[in-house]
Image (cartoon, grey):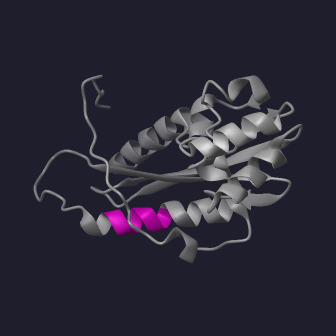
Amino acid sequence: MASISSTTSFPFMSADIDEKAIRKDKPEELVKALAEAKAEAIKLKVHDDCGSDQTTLLITSDQVMVSKGVIRERPQSVEEAREFIKGYSDDRAFAVNFVLVTNLSTGATKGGWDIPEIKFQNIPDEFIDRVVNQGEMTCVAGGLKLTHPSVLPFIKELVGTADSVRGLPRELTEKLIRESLEAKAE
């Protein structure tokens, strides 16, 4: 297996899909459908180099938060962001992630879920108001950047990893990359 140096760069592309047009009742089904739609959209943009002996992998993912059994995507308003964050106070939520690795050289796909649990302390109204008014902290799935230093004091326990909460779980992604590369040899 080829190794990746720390100086290797990877191109990033936007899928430019209408995520609100894709709806599923179960969070696991929703994030999988969104990651797959992103992969299909990006594959249409990618021009594979004919005759290239290098393997090209496409990694897409999606994440939603689930609180009190309700799927929380990116909040659409300040009021919705405030409602999301208030709902976490003295409660728990789950970050439901799906990662899809597509080997563009072979067409093989490997995907999987990672679902960390976040248990919250009481989140004071003053903090919620400050975060919501800042804006940049609430523009993510679930309405709160959980790895931001100002949020960490309100997290009682994280059952999972910080990168899982960010939306691209490293361990799962590495496993899927290995599996995608091995599928080439089969």
Which quarter of the figure has residue 17?
A: bottom left
Residue beneath the point at 74% across and 23% down: 153
Closer to us: 55 or 18 = 18
Closer to us: 113 or 42 = 42
In the rendered image, the quadrant that contains the N terminus is: top left
Which quarter of the figure has residue 10?
A: top left
Examine the structure image and report whether residue 39 is included in the region drawn in magenta. Answer: yes
Residue 42 location (% of width, % of height): 33, 63
Residue 91 location (% of width, % of height): 88, 41
Residue beneath the point at 74% across and 34% down: 127
Closer to us: 53 or 16 = 16
Closer to us: 95 or 130 = 130
**As displayed, is residue 120 above or below residue 149?**
below
- Outermost residue, right side: 90
User: Is residue 157 in view from this perspective?
Assistant: no
In this picture, residue 130 sits left or right of residue 136: right
User: Is residue 172 in view from this perspective?
Assistant: yes
Magenta region, residue range: 36-42
Residue beneath the point at 77% across and 35% down: 126
Examine the structure image and report whether residue 140 is included in the region drawn in magenta. Answer: no
Which quarter of the figure has residue 74?
A: bottom right
**As displayed, is residue 80 above or below residue 173?**
below
In this picture, residue 182 sits left or right of residue 25: left
Counting every numbered tag in the picture gives: 0
- Outermost residue, left side: 51
Q: Main secondary structure of the magenta part?
A: helix
Residue 108 location (% of width, % of height): 40, 58
Residue 129 location (% of width, % of height): 72, 42
